[in-house]
Amino acid sequence: MVMEFPSIALKGNSLGEMISSELRLKIINKSIAPGTVLSENSIAEEFGTSRSPVREALKTLSNEGLIRLERMGAVVLGLSRKDIEELYDVRYLIETFVIERLSKMENQGLIKQLNKILDEMIIAAKYNHYIEFTIQDLKFHELMIEAAEHKRMLHLWNNIRDIVFTALLVATKKRFLEKSNEIDSLVEKHRVLIDSIVSKDLEFIKSVVHDHFEDTRDTVTKSIF
């Protein structure tokens, strides 16, 4: 089995995590359609492994609401429009709080790191590397969340991290292929997020975060449906 999911984006590297990442990608990009019944034995054979890491992977996907575990196997539910709405509601709440918090902290080192990631996004866009672009996009937002030093917000983020990244990967691939003219604008939206931290203006922060996530929510929704 050739892994399609970029392993660099994984928090862990267990076989179960790698299998769940691969299945998650296939479910979200609809290579595996809603209603499909997944068999532990078939998946284990496909990945050349025992059933134990497959069970781990299926439990993870069940907790994310992408599948429903039944006696006959796991039924694929997929990612609905409502799921995307709720995911981005949570992201908006997390990152509005995070950026407001960061604006009140010493953040010169963070700003330097964010600008460096932005440079990596620009290079990835120049060479049409949508996977690297998405990885840097994830790093950008994750760095801010970690820098806020709020363990409960970080916990909320970690609960949605993998599914958010995978949906973003699908959306970014489509954007690179079909709407490459929007990439410069997307980079600029990240630059404005940095400006909002520096500004320390709470109304500006709320406006910038709202605009950023409305755009991303719309792009992800259109890419999947």
Image (cartoon, rainbow, N blue to C red):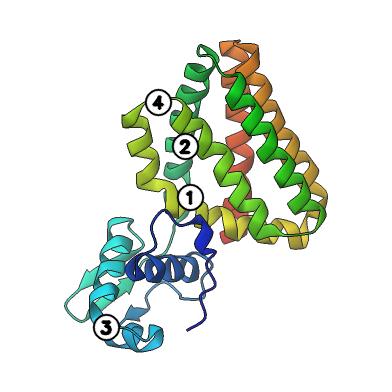
User: Which SS class for mark 3?
Assistant: loop
Residue 208: x and y, percent? 63, 25
Query: Is tag 3's residue or tag 2's residue first in the polypeptide sequence?
Result: 3
Q: Quadrant of the image for the C terminus? A: bottom right
Q: What's the mark number on residue 164? A: 1
Q: Give the residue displayed 62% in from the left and 56% down from the top.
A: 171
Asked if one can make out residue 225 in the rendered structure from this viewpoint, the answer is no
Separation of marks 4 and 2 at Cα, in angstroms: 17 Å
Q: Amino acid at mark 4?
A: Glu
Residue 195: x and y, percent? 68, 21
- Whether label 1 touches label 2, CB < 8 Å: yes
Residue where numbered disc 4 is placed: 149
Mark 1 Cα within 10 Å, few/some/many (few <14, many 20+)? some
Residue 48: x and y, percent? 37, 86
Q: Give the residue displayed 51% in from the left and 17% down from the top.
A: 100
Q: What's the mark number on residue 91? A: 2
User: Which SS class for mark 2?
Assistant: helix
Query: Is tag 3's residue or tag 4's residue first in the polypeptide sequence?
Result: 3
Asked if 36 appears above or below 220 in the picture, the reply is below
Query: Is tag 1's residue or tag 4's residue first in the polypeptide sequence?
Result: 4
User: Which SS class for mark 4?
Assistant: loop
Asked if 174 appears above or below 33 in the picture, the reply is above
Q: Amino acid at mark 3?
A: Ser
Q: Nearer the viewer, mark 3 or mark 1?
A: 3
Taking depth in this image into account, of 42 and 210 the one nearest to the observer is 42
